[in-house]
Image (tube, coloured by chain):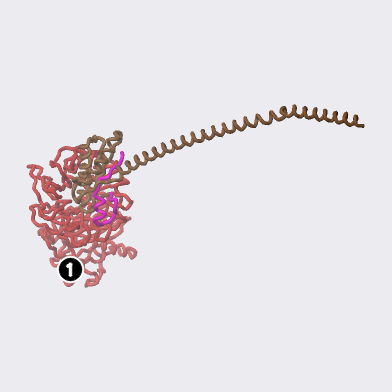
Amino acid sequence: MSIGCKKLKRSHLGLIFVVFITLVACSNRPCQARVYIDINAPYLRKIPTAIPIFKDMASVQSHAQFGKMLSELLTETVKFMGFFKILDRESFIEDPPKARFLEHTINFKNWTDIGAELLIKGGFEYKADLLQVELRLLDTFGGRLIVGRRYTGRPEDHRRIIHRFCDEIILRLTGHPGIFSTRIALVSTTTGNKEIFIADFDGYNPKQFTNTGTITLFPAWSSDGKWLAYTDYRHGKPELFIRNIKEERGTVVGLEGSSITPAWIPGRFALAASLSHEGNPAIYLLSGNGKIMKKLTRYWGIDVAPAWSPDGKEFAFVSNRSGSPQIYIKNVEDGSVRRLTYEGRYNTSPQWSPRGNYIAYVGLANGKSDIYLIGTDGKGPIQLTRDAGDNESPTWSPDGSLIAFSSTREGPSRVYVMNANGTNQRRLLLLEGNQTNPSWSPRLTGD
Amino acid sequence: MTSKFWRGLAVLLVIAGLMCVASCAKKPVVSEPAVTPAAEEEAEAKRLAAEREARAAQKALEEERLREERLREQAMLRKEMAERERFLNEDIHFEFDKSRLLSEAKEILKVKAKWLRARPDVSAIIEGHCDERGTNEYNIALGDRRAHSAKGFLIDLGIAGERLTPISYGEERPVDPGHNEEAWAKNRRAHFVIQ
């Protein structure tokens, strides 16, 4: 087994350099074609995966804890997707290799014997204040390297290095890019007011984003991840704000009435929102500068909560035109409107799957809110949450495999995440106060 | 001796007479100023007392009038305050997921219209609120409709639309934090605030 360094690339992550590692034996056949995980499958078999503690390639004793921390971080990160069953290290046959990581030859039988189908190995080294991390994903039964990378960056970049490799792992195994560069915006009452906070995809490091001192709601990411639209009451009424995330600039859409539920059109600097300045809440198209371009729905009652299809040709929305809130789909090209939900008297908060074929929404039945999934053709619906408080505000991960949502299952409203089939529900983060309105970012480049 | 006696008696008598005359003559001179000023004083005192009394009575009457006026004013102020309080505190209520006005709500709005009509310089904010059930985005839209229902009814009763600003709070500002029908019924409301 030999290693060939194919190319050296300056990454988007500032100081991090990446070296692509491939096996000579592998370069002759199409080893990336196989899809290990079909994220469209309704029930996933979790792949048994072994992740030994990362090796300190320079063998510095004081760095042992760092290797453990890195391997734990990688374990938690890949586990987040719900695709893997991480094997207990106690069951490993192979001792931590004595040999230097790079020269070590893998005895795949030691791993297949304990049931591991995938093996993720890692090594690291400090070189002149820089951290070098080498990571490999191996197919134990196939006895081959699926992907290998060597990253060089500042020691404090270790989270991003691990996230980048995990993105590679997910891309190789599912055919879709991973989501480990994404973040989640949410509303929290931590300060006593409703403010928007932004955390990493896994709830790590939540930071307060707005400081309105009032009610702030409905964060929505532009598809390039550079803008956040939201509603706040700082001028005494619910107004729409469009704010650049990094720079201190943005626009206030200072209309009378309620300006709520912004939703950016994929790939465009434009958004839809529900505005009631003309009397009743209707859906309008606005430019990213806050200029009203067009009225998209016409009805005397309530039209609210637009959610765009991935191709931007249709949007789902909520209307009470049939007497109670139901979800409709409008085609912006031919102007047609069709009703999507018929079950139940109260269906709201549609969110179109980034993969196009499903809409997640909130249904209220017997006084309880739950998350449902319905095909855009009306097939279903499938109930994803049940008997666990009120569950609201679904938001898709950009690969369409996960849904974050708010729930009162533990008392206060908090943000949870689950696989798109409703399995693997767990709390995303713990903050003072109540958390609502989570909104998953697109994949973000740079920092 | 006898003539001496009589002469002496006569002298005595004369003296006595003189004394008597003297005293008689003197008496009015002495007593006159003593009697007359006292009566005058008494009369004056009476007059003053009467005057004081009259003044006091007048003052009491005036005070009574002022008090009554104050009371009337206070009562009016209280009534005014009560009407204002009622305008501000008497919410109209709605059914779940509905923005139509119930007959009770219409009666309350008629009182509010009367109050607004008498105060053409007053502008009001009509807050639309919802209970916690359902989703917060739909509830802002619903609160918007509720505030507009109230505004539309007041416009029909002759209040200028420019004086009425609807603002929806959805489920964000409940008056009762409870999670039961009693709390929900209180929270499904339109609330008035003077601008």
> Residue B32's spot in the image, x, y percent?
69, 28
Q: Nearer the viewer, residue A127 or B191?
A: B191
Residue designated by label 1: A116
Which element is circle 1 on? loop
Chain assigned brown: B
When asked about the image quadrant of residue B50, the answer is top right
What chain letter is assigned to the residue under label 1? A
Q: Amino acid at mark 1?
A: Ala
> Residue A294's spot in the image, x, y percent?
15, 38
Chain assigned red: A
Does residue A342 appear left or right of residue A409 in this picture? left
Q: Nearer the viewer, residue A21 or A178?
A: A178
Q: Residue at 37% x, 40% y: name it.
A: B75
Magenta span includes B189: yes
> Residue A326's spot in the image, x, y percent?
13, 50
Question: What residue span does the magenta drawing correspond to?
Answer: B173-195
